[in-house]
Amino acid sequence: MKFRLRTRLIMGFVIITVLTMGAFALVARISITQRFNNMVHQAGQEYAQRMSVFFGLYYASNGSWDGVQDLFINFGSPLSISITNNPSQIPPYLNTDPGGIVVGRFPNRGIIDPRDERLLLIDSNGAVVFDSNPNAGSPDSLLAKRDQGVNIVIDDQTVGTVVAASSIGILNSVQESYINDVNQYTLIGGLAAIIIAVVLGAYQAFKIIKPVKALSQASHKLASGDYSQRIPTTSDDELGEMSSAFNQMAEELERQETLRQRALADVAHELRTPLSVLQIDLESIEDGILEPSRETIQQLQLEVSTLKKLVDDLRTLSLADAGELVMDFQPLEINALIRVNAKRIANSAKEKNIQVSVDLEDGEIFVMGDEQRLSQVLLNLLTNGIHFTPQNGSIQVESKRKGTSIQVLVHDTGDGISQQDLPLIFERLYRSDQARTRESGGSGLGLSIARSLVEAHHGKIWAESDPGDGSSFIFELPEKKNE
Ligand code: ADP
């Protein structure tokens, strides 16, 4: 059978409540009944004991049980019994007169009600000599439990036994109705608890289901491409956490989608510019407006190489994204790599009269790396440095150990990078000055490629810049330990 979550939750609440309440009611019923019976038994026993004193006094003063039944004639009113033989045996709760006259009241817990508490006085022969309620039917059940009664012993002789109904577990009507009431209230309480459980369960189920339902609907829409889906976070429990985790995921997907769309548009735009130039120039040649001179062909080749570089960069990035960049990891001495690449930019530095200095950590430092890829990173940072540093500036390249890593730092004395551009320069196709860098051939892919390559070497790369104090690009790689 297939149940909806809400039904299952309500059923769960009800089953738990019924089981709990059932167990509780059962335990309560058993313990209350047992304690009540014990109490009744104990009270009955005490009652029989007190009565046995009373009857004992009667026997002691009378010498026999004759006339004992007549005591009930005086039921409910003070009894006056004269005993003269042994006043010292008179228990303290009976009023005594100085002349040995006992004035007592039937020593009950209140007033003995013959219709309520049946009391038997059985003589030494087993005959009933006093029955507080002879109309209540055969006294056999009480007689049968005579051994549980209280014996009256006078001068070492058992002259009779008192048996109270409650002391042998026979409940009177008040006690009976008390126990029935307890059972009834337990049942009503249990039913009320179940009803409350169903109502509360339904409410709780509704509260749980609401965000789950919202999540399910939003997930479907998200799956069909609507990344604007968000669900309200109404609580700070696990359901709230689930909602905010979903919102975070949707936000990230939306961001990724925006980036993807932007990247596609940017790439199209980047490709369009050199292609348009090519198209216009070729059309002009075709129409005879432009001479297919050596100079024109060189110009066209420049556009083609810009296009090729862009396509190559895009390919490198997409391979890095897919984790498919083929890397040839070898032990690489980083100081040597820095020297080689610093030399490669020497000419362009000279053109702008930029001083390139190298300050390297002593000795040799090895990393596991792909020589070509790490050269690409270094060269990108160095050419950027030359690019963004005005005439007569300087570029400093450093290497230094940092714990188990090695840091390579490229610092220039250019204009620096604004705080708002700093977190964005490693994004694809990002250029802080679109016009200037495109003119100079920059595609805005260099730093994102550098980041992908450094990360493929299990390293990290970042930039620091104080406006007016140039920029520093730092990448950090794990140092290769000597085995
Ligand atoms: P590009 O190929 O266009 O230079 P990059 O990814 O290498 O692209 O750089 C992205 C942007 O970062 C640049 O357009 C520039 O705004 C900024 N940038 C990079 N290097 C430097 C630097 N040394 N000084 C100032 N800005 C820099």
Image: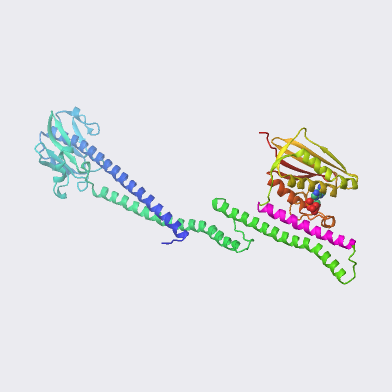
Q: Position of residue 314 (x, y in %)?
A: 73, 56
Q: Among all residues in the image, which is located at the extreme left?
A: 125
Q: Is residue 153 left or right of residue 389?
A: left
Question: Is residue 342 found inside the magenta-colored segment of the image?
Answer: no
* Residue range of the region highlighted in magenta in the rendering: 294-323
Rendered residue at 85%/39% (across/down): 357
Q: Compared to 200, does 382 lie above or below? A: above
Q: What secondary structure is the magenta-colored segment mainly?
A: helix
Question: Is residue 308 found inside the magenta-colored segment of the image?
Answer: yes
Total marks placed: 0
Rendered residue at 37%/51% (across/down): 19
Q: Is residue 400 left or right of residue 210?
A: right
For the rendered model, the colour scheme is rainbow
User: In this view of the protein, which residue sits in the foreground, 180 or 99?
Assistant: 180
Q: Is residue 219 left or right of residue 439?
A: left
User: In this view of the protein, which residue sits in the foreground, 195 or 228?
Assistant: 228
Which quadrant of the figure contains the C terminus? top right
Q: Position of residue 289 (x, y in %)?
A: 90, 70
Rendered residue at 72%/53% (across/down): 316
Q: Compared to 299, does 45 lie above or below? A: above
